[in-house]
Amino acid sequence: MKVGDYNNIIAGQQTSRRRLLQGAAGLGAAAVGGGFGAFSSARAAGTPSADEMALRKAILKVPGVGKGSPTDADWQKVGELCLGPTKARVKPGEFKGVQLTFMGLNNQNLHDFLFRGFLKPWETYTGAKISWIDVAQADYSPRLQQAIATGTIDFDLLEMGAPFEGEVCGKGLTSEMPEEVKQQIDVTDLVNYLKPPVGTWEGKTYRVTIDGDCHTINYRTDVFSDPDLTKAWKSAGNSAPWGNPRTWQQVQKVTKFLAGKQVAGKDVYGYLDAPKPWGGFGFYFLASRATAYVKYPGEKAWLFDVDTMKPRVNSAGWVRAIQDVVDALPSEPPNQINADPNTTGFQQFLAGTGSLVSWWGDIGQNANTSDSSVVGDVIGFDILPGSDDVFNHTTGKWETLSSGPNFAPNMAYLGWGVYVMSRVNGDSAKHKAAWSAAAHLGGKDLSIWTVMYPSGFQVHRQSHFNIQEWLDAGYDKAYITNYLASQSNSYNHPNVAIEPRIPGIFQYYSLAEDELAKIFAGKVGAQKGADNIAAAWEKLTDQLGREKQIALYKASLGI
Amino acid sequence: MRGRAAASRRQAGRALILVASIALVGVILLQILRAAGEIQVGFANWRPVLYAYVVWAIALGAGQVLMHGERGRRALFVLPAVLFTVAVVIFPTLFGFYIASLDWNLSATSGPRFNNFHNFVELFNDPDYWNALTNMLFYVVAVLVEYAIAFGLALLLTAEIRARKFFRLAFLLPFMLSPVAVSWMIGKSIFEYRFGPASNFMRFLGWRTPAVFAHAWTARIGIEVMAGWVAIPFIMILLLAGLQALPKEVQEAAQVDGASAWQSFWRVTFPLMLPVSITALLIRIIFQLKLADIVINVTGGGPGGATDTVSSYIYRVYSDRSNVGYGTALAMFYLVMIIIFLTVMLRLANRWTRNLT
């Protein structure tokens, strides 16, 4: 359906977009091919109607998968096509004179850059004006903390991750989501792990979810099917067949094996660690190596003891993960100690260096849609590797599970969301405008575009797992099936590792990063360094208020 | 009659200053009590205190004129500068020491708390801080190398060479670049391990794995090369100005006396240039002690703290960990150390210069 036609219908019938689309038959189930056991339950709840599908099809052709990176013109076009729900609820020019300020990220020229494009037609239609505060990833946490602590919240809309909800929503700084917005963005369509308590605080909903987060492993299919490497692997006395590793023990073995090897005349490396600090966010990458060792099935806690907040980071499981990095680094590219996650994901893996990397789903989105990617045809995806044994913190012993390797996908960061600040509550026009803007960005149709193209956001709705839409957009079936399975199987895994939504969580991570840098540079041993991290964390917990932290930690774990 | 008029003017001046002072103190007290939660009245923010200070400053100036006539008018030439310095240098420094005495983490539910200057005790047991201070020794000593290069370039540009004006401009260009841009262009691109031209050149020279920033000493030197590249033109331009101001007669006399080029430089030019050299070195060292941007961008202080500077460490404590009280204590302690270091250095340099000239 063309935007113009759609607008005419809406204008003529005085009906809402959802109502208009409600009558159409759903075709999601029919459109989806079989073979996705994990997706089947997800599909049923979020299946779009036929008209909605037509609109989504049009959106996903902007600019088209494999046709280069989208530009600002594309973002504006998508924003224009997705204006329907806004037009159904807001009169043209209704927000004239309303000035809003939005604070978000500028990572890889995405996030705020996309929001600007998406919201441009919204501004033109509603008459509101938005000014922008762009913050780099590493500066995000301090900028937010300072605004909170000094009482200088200078923004009305905020792009924020769930880990900060304790310090922002818990302090009453955000505006509660109106019921109408919940309907507009269809919150029931979110994948289960992003439903409450995530996005809520004390029973009230605050977040427009625009992202889902988990780390998965991305691997090079050409490397793990290379005949010469297969031969060399066998000659090296390995009994297991050559292929992508499924446990961290195998990752270590493969990484050491690949050191000094070449594929198509180029040096090939195994796993890419990210040892350089990244404003606290780099700790997630050690956590992804550790969760299979330390997240014991059935136990929610894996970072701190629940009743005391005693850190577990110096337990045998964490120390093994740290030692793994130390052992692997000599087999990784020579400058690896200077690589942060941005380097490993975008400058190395997508550019053809390394054959294994843990990252958020952005890698899969960018592999086929970014101009700088050279691995679009040779990339495979899986949930994070498991471990042959798991550390039982209660008994203090390593255990081999009868069910096989222990897998524990790391739900790192729990996704970005858009929050409206409570400072708009006193002004009804501003309040409505802010929620309208947030709902536009969190719209169901717009979201399918953001998860399919480079945006910084990954699949987070049940409706995102409709394979046919991805195929219509130009994705290869095997590729996208593999990609979505890695996401879905992570989200729905029974042993997911959920991080605590406690104040100062990035301070814990930042302290750890400094100490880890010393370990990785060989200045201190893994155990000693881990003990130093634990001591620094204990001190921080005391400074932040131990009792309060324990209470919030328990709340975040749902205990 | 005139005496009485003068006395009444003096009284009016005193009264004006007194009223303005009472008003200023009153506004400050009111706001402190409000901030402490003792009273409800007061202003929503501290801006009225600034307005009260400005009004007080005007009253103080007017009072001086009323009380002291011509002498007071002369004081008006200095007073604004003094009051401005108090407002933007002395007060923030004192306020900084106050913040440094607090246990204040922005995420702490309890807010700022006075902690008996424990932050200053804690910093003595902070290995990361002392590691950064030790690294600063290297960066400061490296300024001498920068100085030697800058002196060489300045001598070159004083000589009658072709395209002298072009070279003067060309040599100044790095100084005009932002260190952040330099760290990206050089540290992240030219020295990029896989395809950076500098890395390829080093491979050509026989270094198989030219990962400059992966090893402690090469990383330190790499950072210093970038910092020096930006700063050498600055030293050079100061020295060039000094060289051009040197009396030609002295150098000509040395040549007539048969001094070689080296003797002419070492016995005549260098001693005469010492005052300029010391000024240039002092300014450069002050800048070097604040080195942070290149380190944060290129190595983040790594590998393992090898390139960390005090400023980049404070940046992490303050920015990544929101530890405002401790971060300020680190900065204040560093400020005191810099003042002591530069004072001692200046005295030693003065003594050395006196002995030499």
Image: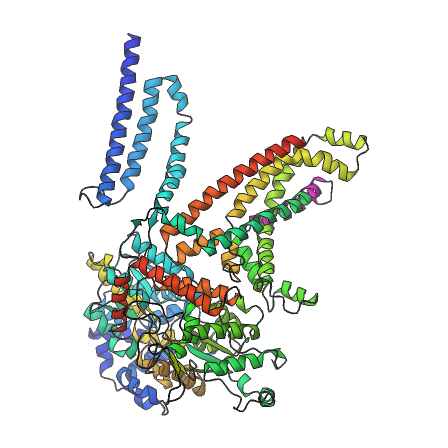
**Relative to the observer, which residue lies in front, A71 or A113?**
A113
Is A134 part of what is drawn in magenta?
no
- Viewer can see residue A68: no
Identify the image's colour scheme: rainbow, by chain, secondary structure or one colour: rainbow
The answer to whether residue B102 is above or below residue A371 is above
The answer to whether residue B93 is above or below residue A415 is above
In which quadrant of the rendered image does the N terminus of chain A lie?
Answer: bottom left
Tell me the residue at 25%/84% (across/down). A24
Image quadrant assignment for residue A22: bottom left
Measured as percent of width and height from the top left, residue A49 is found at 28, 83
Measured as percent of width and height from the top left, residue B107 is found at 31, 58
Is B173 part of what is drawn in magenta?
yes
The boundaries of the magenta stretch are B154-178
Total numbered circles: 0
Q: Main secondary structure of the magenta part?
A: helix
Tell me the residue at 21%/58% (across/down). A425
